[in-house]
Structures are given as C-alpha cells and as structure tokens.
Image (cartoon, coloured by chain):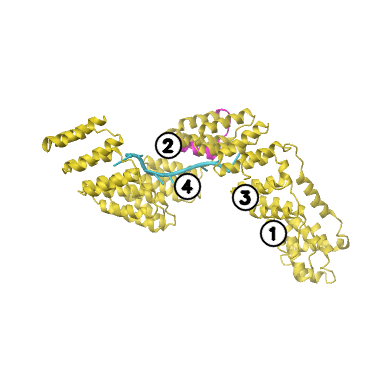
Chain colours: A yellow, B cyan
Amino acid sequence: MVRTPSSIISFIRHSSAGARFDPAGQLRNLTTESKDGDCGGNYRDVINEICLITRRRPRWEHTLLSEFPSLNFSDPLLFHAYLKHQNNAFLSLRFFNWLCSYCGFSPDQSSCNALFDVLVDAKACNAAKSLLDCAGFTPEPSSLECYIRCLSHGGMVEEAVNVFGKLKNVGFCPSLATWNASLSACLKTGRTNLVWTLYELMMASDVIANIDVETIGYLIQAYCNDNKVSNGYGLLRHILEDGLCPDNTVFNSLISAFSREEEYARASELLHVMIAKGLAPDIFTYQEIINGLFKRRKNLEGFRIFNDLKDRGYLPDRVMYTTIIKGLCDMEWHGEARKLWFEMIRKGLLPNEYTYTVMINRYCRIGDFDNARKLYNEMCDKGYEETTVTCNAMISGLCFHGMTDEAQRLFEEMSQRGIVCDIITYNSLIRGLIKKGNLIEAKKLFNELLVQGLEPSTSSVTILIKRLCEDGDTQEAIRLWKDMVSRNWEPMVSTYGYIVTGLCEQGSFTEAMEWLFEMLNKKLKPRKRTFETLIQCLLKNDKLDDILVALDLMLTIGYTLQKNTIESLVKKFDEKSFNFAGTCLERISERN
DNA sequence: ACAACGGCCA
C-alpha cells in the first residue's frame, strides 16, 4: 500500500526538499575524466589517420589492414586512443565490432565501459543496449545511471526501470535527478503504471528521503492519468501547505482531469491558486479551462475568456483557435467562427486537419456543401489526408439535410479509397436511411457493421428497433433485440416501450403485457407515454381486463392520466359497461 | 503538453 497520498506526504514532511545538488554534473565529470586519461600515447602518430580513414571511407576495413600491416589492432590502448579522437559514437561502435571480429581484439571491461559511455553520451540507447549484451560486460553503476537517463530521454522507459532494478541489486542508488527524469519519461510515454513501479523502488531506497516538489508533481500527474484526480489534488494541497509549489504542468494536469470529470469548480479553484502563487497560467492552462467549459456547454463563457486572454496579450495558438471556432460553430455563431478562421490565418497560424475538420463540419451542418467541398479539397491540396473523421462529417451533414443518396455514394467511395469506416460512419448513414424510410438498406448496413466486427452503439440498435416496431415488424425487432442481448447490449427503457406498443398495435396483446411485466421484473420504470399508447390501443380493441392491469400499474408508479385518455375511458364506459368505467374512475380518484 | 466526427424527438 505505497500508493496513498498519506504515505507520500509522510515522506515529504521528512524530506529536505529544495536542498538540491547536481549529481548529473558530477556524473558528466566522471565520464569526461575517463575520456581524457592519456592512453593514446603509443599511437599518437597513427590514430589521427585511422580516425580520418574510418570517417571518410565507407569501406575502410581492408584499407586499414593494408595501410598499417604491422600495427597491433588487438591492443586495448589502440581502441582507447581511437575513442578519444573519434567524435562519432556509431563509428566507434563499428570500429569496436570490427576489432572484435577481425583483429583478435578481446574487449576488456575498460574498453567496453569507455565505449558504453560514449554511446550513452551520444544518446544512442539502442547501440548502448546492444553493447550490454556483450558477454561478460558489466558497466560501472555510474555509467548505468547515465544510461538510465539516455533511455528515459529516448522513451525506452521499460528498460530504464529494469536498470533501476539492476542498480538496486548492487546497492547503488541513482541521484534524485535521474529518478525524476525517468518518472517524467514514463508520463510522457503514457506508461503511468511504471511511475508507480519506480515510486515503489524509490520507497525501498535512500533517495526517498530527498524527494522534491518535482517528484511529487510527477506523482500528481500519474494520479490524474489514472483518473484518481482527488488523490492528486490531496497531494497538491499537502505540498502547498508545506510551502512548495509545483510548476504549470502539474496544475494543467489537475485542471484537465477535473474538467474531464466535470468538476469545473475545482478546476476554477486551481486556476486561482496558480495566480495566487504567482504562477502565470499558460496557454495550455486556459486551453484546459476553455475546453472544460465547452464540454459543459458553457460556450459563451469560454468565448469570453478567450477574448479576455487576447486583450491581456496572450497569443492563442492554433489549437486554441480551433477549439474556439468549434465552440462558436456549436453555438451556431457562424459569423464569429468565420471571423476567427481568417484572424487565425492572418496571424500566420495555418489551419491543420483539425481546423479544417471543424470548418468542414460547420458547412455540412448548415448544408453549405459547396463550401464544405471547397475546404475539403483545399485541405487535401495542403497535404492533409482525408480521414474517417472528415468523411463522417460530410456523411452526417448530407444525411442531416436529406441527401442520403450522396452520403451513400461517399460511403462507397471511402472503402474504394482505403478510408476506414467506423461506427460513426455506419450510425450516421443508418440514421439517414431510416429517416428516408429505407429500412432494407439500413438493415443491410447494420449487418455489414456487425460483420466488420464493429460494436454497434445503443443509438443505432435503438433506432432500428424503433423503426421496425413502427413499421409493424415487431417480431423482427424482437429477433434483433435477442441477437443484440447475446452480444452484451443493454437496452434502454425506451426501447422496451417500442416493443410493448409495437406488439399491442399488431394485436399481440398478451405478448405486449408480458413485455411490460418483464420491464417491471427488471425494476425498469416504463415511460408514461408507453402506458398512454398501450391503454389507447387496448381500448380500441376492447381489452378491458388488460386496461385495468395497465391502469393499476401506471397509477402505482405515480403517473397521472392525460385528459384525452380519461375521455377515451369515459367514452368506452358509455359504449360498454358501467362497471368498467366505474372501476376505472374509482381507481383514478383513489390515487389523485 | 492542449484540439476533431454522431446521438437530440421516450
């Protein structure tokens, strides 16, 4: 149980956070020292020439042997001299391999170490890693520490974590800066689980006594990535109490995570903490805030903040312009959106595929397909690939405006052009086809979607079932229902209602009532409208007993009857039976 | 580091 804020806090409380030293600098000195040692004395005359030959000739192996027939290439001192004079890590590795394979050079620890350091310095992670596989080579712990930094820098975080483990086994504890660099790399590569692995290793080593605000910042971000933002927030609160303040990145992660969870008050509070602590919220902070507002449909407020930022001299970047343009389009402020599009270009921020998609989507929504097409072509001319998303925007726009045939044509073109259709493509088109009454084609597409292995979303299943019920093919709807349930589909309450009323309208009264009971067994509350339609339909067919049952259920749930339903009941009472109407009215008045 | 497509009408 190491991953609790409180256990982390107890370590901060006892740590000497803030007192920094620079182990990295010390490490660098070590490596330079070993490079500067004078080991090339014997080869001073030839080494420059060897370096030149290997640098300039692509195939120097034979040249070297013929030019220096009496030279002892297997002497480790020659290799050290070469390393010292050759500034290219990869050439050095090639030279090393050549010496090993063709010159009887048997690599000693010191040669391997020196080469390893050179490779690590050159950030050649993979080359350094290949050297580690050399039989019998064990680098110095300090070299391994540099290697960890090299790996972290190159995103090879898993290997970095392994090396931490190796160092732990030999009792060597890397500096805090190295731990921090690796934590940061784990976050950047999205390997949050490795942050916690590293943190557990830290807990087991002496470095835990020295962890600083940077370390805590990474832990906070890891919590945010893990959707445990409240843990991250707790950690932040504690370090703030201790007078420490993490940097913008940490605040941004928290604000972003709170926005994601729609805890806008917390996000806003953090913004104020930043300002109070003298941190200037940056463009990314505001991006998170504005995006959070947009997601909560507070577009106007987002737009206000954006304008406010510009007034205060912030320079919004392309992402922010794109976000705002999208927000304005969603508000249907098309004029403002267009204005920003040109303002952005005027400021030298060229639209990218995201910006184009937003604008194309806007034109499609308002049915201006000429302009949508124009932008679409412009986007492709600029070298941006047409994507599933842009095609979806076009297809859903075309369907929205009843141009289903064109949407279908585009859909077919997509597969011809190798653009993947996703669930949104199918859903949009199915919706469009159903709207046009083309149920056969919609069903065909639905099956195709299943064949493709796509997971149909609730909405596309629901709309098909609805339409089948309305068209009088409730049995087909039930078949589809059962098929979908076997695929772990969860029907919505309303979908039950379609089946109940569908069955009733087709005269399957008993079955309709069974479905109604099924809902109640499942503790689902049927909609009022389901009852209304059901009762009207039962009335039409003189199913008086079923009406009483339905009425009872409806009133128990707490629904009241619509005026026209009461009127129908009373009318039925005139036509049929006194008792029946009496019972109904009794029950209605009992509950009201 | 930050951003994109649907659904609405049970």
Magenta stretch, main secondary structure class:
helix
Figure label count = 4
Instruction: Provide the chain ID for the residue under circle 4.
Output: A
Instruction: Provide the chain ID for the residue under circle 1.
Output: A
Q: Earlier in the sequence, mark 1 or mark 2?
A: 1
Q: Is residue A137 magenta?
A: no
Marks 4/2 same chain: yes
Q: Give the amino acid at mark 1.
A: Lys
Confirm whether residue A436 shows in the render: no
Q: Secondary structure at mark 2?
A: helix
Question: Cα distance, mark 3 to mark 1?
Answer: 20 Å
Front position among marks 4 and 2: 2
Front position among marks 4 and 3: 3
Q: Residue furthest left?
A: A575
Question: Cα distance, mark 4 to mark 2?
Answer: 21 Å
What residue is disc 2 on? Answer: A330
What residue is disc 4 on? Answer: A379
Q: Give the amino acid at mark 3.
A: Leu
